[in-house]
Image (spheres, helix red, strand yellow):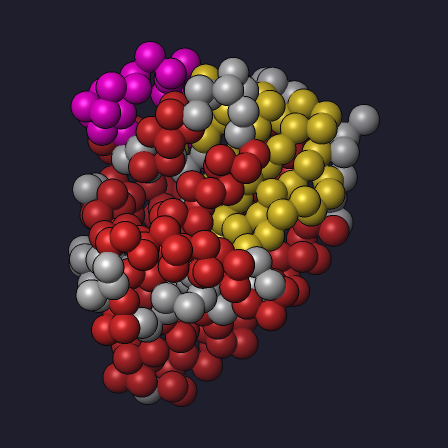
């Protein structure tokens, strides 16, 4: 049995999740690394003056970084509650002037904002993971939003890296209960219990091969790929007391590891950059 996408279910989850979406990057070292490696993708592919569509923007971690890079941003999310938090966080950070507007949008239907209208479209944190069987439609919409030669930056939840990161919970619940997740990548029911709110956190977790096939079937070229973390997964103890002066040194080592093909499946997210080859 596979899970089907429900926009209402995802919207309700993130309306209730609220500030926890901002806080999740502070929960452990692997999450901090996850944030920093996503930012490094932004720095490689976003240029001052770029018009950027941000899908699944949440409370604004990546919006603020886009603004720092000099982008002009149309901020969107499926959750109106997350957009309210985004406005507050971005304003507090002093970057509201970089925002063209905010819209409630579903990644599977971006037609209302126009085609080929952006230099870059981003979908960080997993919008394609939440739409299950409609991930291909979501990717088509992201590619249609950017000009020919434009860039799509996206990340999806990673199956094996996530099971590794949350192995304690997997073992506590019983490996048998996670067999369907391991076989299909679909997380729902008992395997989707949130530790933050009393709602299931349902999603599809990708393998690298699966994401690569999704990309290969579309008019785009894969130009960059990385795991979002690797060395830091389940390494809180080893990294808890790292000298702050050596943090950047560690991040560079982590990034080099994450960008090797053998590590792409081993982080909690997979990040890619795609260049549109639409005519």
User: Residue at point 60% right, 63% down?
Assistant: 260
Q: Is residue 139 left or right of residue 158?
A: right
Q: Residue 105 location, x and y as percent?
A: 44, 30
User: Residue at point 32% right, 37% down?
Assistant: 61
> Would you say residue 107 is visible in this rendering?
no
> Which residue occupies the foreground of this view, 150 or 2?
150
> Which residue occupies the foreground of this view, 122 or 3?
122
Q: Which quadrant of the figure contains the C terminus?
A: top right
In the displayed structure, would residue 177 be above or below residue 214? below
In the displayed structure, would residue 113 be above or below residue 212? above
Quarter occupied by residue 120: top right
> Would you say residue 122 is visible in this rendering?
yes
User: Residue at point 42% right, 68% down?
Assistant: 231
Does residue 92 belong to the magenta stretch?
yes
> Which residue occupies the foreground of this view, 181 or 208?
208
Q: Residue furthest front?
A: 245
Q: Residue 14 location, x and y as percent?
A: 29, 44
Q: Residue 101 location, x and y as percent?
A: 38, 16
Q: Residue 2 location, x and y as percent?
A: 51, 65
Quarter occupied by residue 247: bottom left
Does residue 115 belong to the magenta stretch?
no
Q: How many marks?
A: 0
User: Residue at point 30% right, 19% down?
Assistant: 95
Q: Is residue 179 left or right of residue 81?
A: right
Q: Residue furthest right?
A: 279
Q: Which residues are magenta?
A: 86-107
Quarter occupied by residue 93: top left
């Amino acid at each position: 049995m596979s899970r089907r996408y429900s926009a209402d279910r995802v919207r309700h989850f993130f309306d209730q999740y609220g500030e926890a979406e901002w806080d999740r990057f502070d929960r452990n070292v692997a999450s901090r690394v996850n944030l920093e490696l996503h930012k490094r993708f932004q720095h490689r592919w976003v240029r001052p003056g770029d018009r950027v569509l941000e899908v699944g923007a949440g409370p604004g971690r990546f919006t603020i970084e886009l603004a720092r890079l000099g982008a002009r941003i149309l901020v969107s999310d499926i959750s109106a509650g997350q957009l309210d938090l985004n406005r507050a966080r971005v304003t507090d950070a002093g970057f509201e002037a970089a925002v063209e507007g905010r819209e409630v949008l579903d990644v599977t239907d971006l037609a209302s904002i126009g085609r080929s209208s952006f230099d870059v479209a981003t979908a960080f944190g997993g919008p394609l993971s939440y739409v299950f069987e409609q991930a291909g439609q979501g990717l088509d919409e992201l590619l249609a939003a950017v000009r020919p030669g434009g860039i799509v930056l996206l990340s999806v939840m990673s199956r094996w890296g996530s099971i590794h990161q949350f192995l304690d919970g997997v073992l506590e619940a019983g490996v048998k209960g996670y067999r369907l997740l391991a076989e299909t990548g679909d997380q729902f029911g008992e395997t989707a219990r949130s530790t933050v709110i009393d709602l299931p956190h349902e999603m599809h977790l990708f393998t690298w091969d699966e994401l690569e096939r999704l990309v290969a079937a579309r008019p785009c070229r894969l130009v960059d790929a990385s795991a979002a973390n690797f060395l830091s997964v389940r390494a809180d103890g080893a990294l808890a007391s790292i000298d702050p002066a050596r943090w950047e040194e560690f991040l560079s080592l982590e990034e080099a590891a994450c960008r090797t093909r053998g590590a792409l499946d081993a982080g909690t997210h997979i990040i890619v950059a795609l260049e549109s080859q639409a005519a």
